[in-house]
Image (cartoon, rainbow, N blue to C red):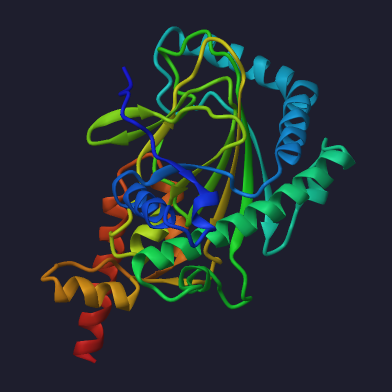
Amino acid sequence: MASTLSFPIIDMGLLSLSGEERPAAMDLLHDACENWGFFQVLDHGISTELMDEVETMTKAHYKRVREQRFLEFASKTLQEGGGKAAENLDWESTFFVRHLPEPNIADIPDLDDEYRRVMKRFAVELEKLAERLLDLLCENLGLEKGYLARAFRGSKGVPTFGTKVSSYPPCPRPDLVKGLRAHTDAGGIILLFQDDRVGGLQLLKDGEWVDVPPTRHSIVVNLGDQLEVITNGRYKSVLHRVIAQTNGNRMSIASFYNPASDAVIFPAPALVAKEVEAGGGGTYPRFVFEDYMKLYVRHKFEDKEPRFEAFKSMESESAKLIAIA
């Protein structure tokens, strides 16, 4: 049973103002990043008309192109399972659109031209929102404006940015299969436009699974592993999952604003210095994002800490070799 803890909701309209309500809204954002790793934003600047278009076209595309394919696969999978739990399977139908550094939406089959145009417009708005949020995080952390966005840029001067479009159809045996198994996200900051009628997304907080409430025209934001590293653990990525539902087809459009593949990720020196002054301890590792992803894809549905420890071990070995040389 999921907990009913109050999920943080941020009114971004208050963050745009210089009025008396802004400090409290910034505190709420800081608390959400420190203690939840997730929050929901309203008044985020993306038009409701555009969001409605995206939703209508996404659901129509699934119905027209992907539904029958998924139903055939799902039926076969459950039959072959013979009533046993599916440990390495997710009850979802997905496709992925890359926006940066090189877009691939023109190459994805079965998308009609209007859907492509609408998704491009939506991606532009999401990119702006991601960068605005990163600057608000910088402000709360005491980092200079633009620090986090710059940390994501590699040799080409742009981040990696893409969208995973998912449908979670009704599942006749949610006791046997998860919609999506528990994991943290590998990347930077993730913006989710989710179905406002069908729930299922949960995050782990203080040992309890908490429902992420479906709210119309909101964007759910969560922090990935790279922000945990750059903030030296001040902000943390959080385990989350999707519970398969017996009724309703849940739409999920998750956009990942991630570092470039060759970006070097490491804790912000200013934050490490603050921690040292406060008598704090360890420092997160330094690595190239592409190397982290190679490890992540093999261990996505496992704890994140061994991934961090693996890179810390590599750093230690490198330091020893340099000392010997």
Q: Where is residue 119 in the image (x, y as percent from the top left)?
A: 75, 45
Instruction: Single out the residue that lies furthest toward the front.
Output: 20
Where is residue 111? Give x, y as percent.
82, 38
**Which quadrant would the C terminus be assigned to in this image?**
bottom left
Q: What's the residue at 54%, 13% (across, down)?
A: 171
| Residue at position x 55%, y 46% in the image | 191
Q: Residue at x 37, y 66 (%)?
A: 230
In percent of the image, x 20 and y 81: which residue is there?
Answer: 320
Left or right: 284 with respect to 151? left
Q: Where does residue 272 sit, x and y in percent of width and height?
A: 25, 73
Q: Which residue lies furthest to the bottom in this view?
A: 325
Describe residue 62's horizontal placement relative to residue 275 as left or right.
right
Using the image, determine if residue 147 lies above or below residue 131.
Answer: below
**In the foreground, 49 or 304:** 49
The answer to whether residue 160 is above or below residue 218 is below
Instruction: Tell me, yes or no, if residue 100 can be seen here.
Output: yes
Is the N terminus in the top left, top right, bottom left or bottom right quadrant? top left
